[in-house]
Structure formats: C-alpha cells, structure tokens
Image: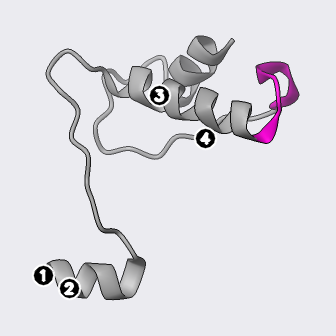
Amino acid sequence: SDEWITSRVGIKTRHVGGPDEPVDEMAAHAGAKALATAGLAPSDVDLVLVATSTAIDRSPSMSARVAARLG
C-alpha cells in the first residue's frame, strides 16, 4: 500500500516515462543533474553504474549508454 511504502522507504511519488523517453536518456538526464548539483564534470567520474529491469538491448550495456550520453 502507499502508506506501507512511504513509511518504510520514504517514496511518495513515482514517475513513469513516456513511450518516446528511452531509459538511458532519463538516466543520463538524472546523472547530469546530479553532476551539476555536485559541481562536477563528466570527466570527474570514473565509473557509471546503472541498475534497471528495463534495458534497451543486451549490448551496449545501459551503463555504457548513459556514460556516452554524459560525455
């Protein structure tokens, strides 16, 4: 239930991407926002890890796709 989830993990909202919003694009947008908030450049990142159950293809990996989008 909503109450159970909120009380245990603090999630209050859930966002769902549209049919024209690829997972790697959404992840890269979130990564770019996190980098900007931290005052870091993509070149400051040594490793990109992505955990998803909605992969686009087997190869390249979602992490590689996101890293490429970040620069």
What number of labels is visible? 4
Closest to the observer: 6 or 49? 6
| Direction from residue 33 to residue 53 in the image, left or right | left
Which of the marked residues, 4 or 2, is nearer the chain's N terminus?
A: 2
Q: Amino acid at mark 4?
A: Leu
> Comparing marks 4 and 2, which lies closer to the viewer?
2
**Camera-side mark, 3 or 1:** 1
Provide the residue designation for mark 4. 49
The CA span between labels 4 and 2 is: 30 Å
Q: Is residue 32 above or below residue 71?
A: below
Distance, label 3 to label 1, CA atoms, is 30 Å
Residue type (three-letter) at the residue carrying disc 2: Glu
Residue marked by disc 1: 1
Q: Which residue is pictured at 23% across the width and 32% down the height? A: 17
Give whichever of 41, 46 is nearer the camera: 41
Q: Residue at x 48, y 17 (%)?
A: 60
Among the 4 quarters of the image, the one containing residue 16? top left
Q: Does the residue at mark 1 contact the one at mark 4 (Cβ under 8 Å)?
A: no
Asked whether the beta carbons under mark 3 and mark 2 sit within 8 Å of each other, the answer is no
Q: Amino acid at mark 3?
A: Met
| Residue on which disc 2 sits | 3
At a point 52% along the width and 18% down the height, the residue shown is 65
Upstream in sequence: badge 3 or badge 2:
2
Alpha carbon of mark 1 to alpha carbon of mark 4: how far? 30 Å
Q: CA distance from mark 4 to mark 3?
A: 8 Å
Q: Which residue is mark 3?
A: 62
Nearer to us in this view, 32 or 54: 32
Residue in the picture at 71% in, 33% down: 35
Mark 2 neighbour class, 10 Å CA radius: few under 14, some 14 to 19, many 20 or more: few
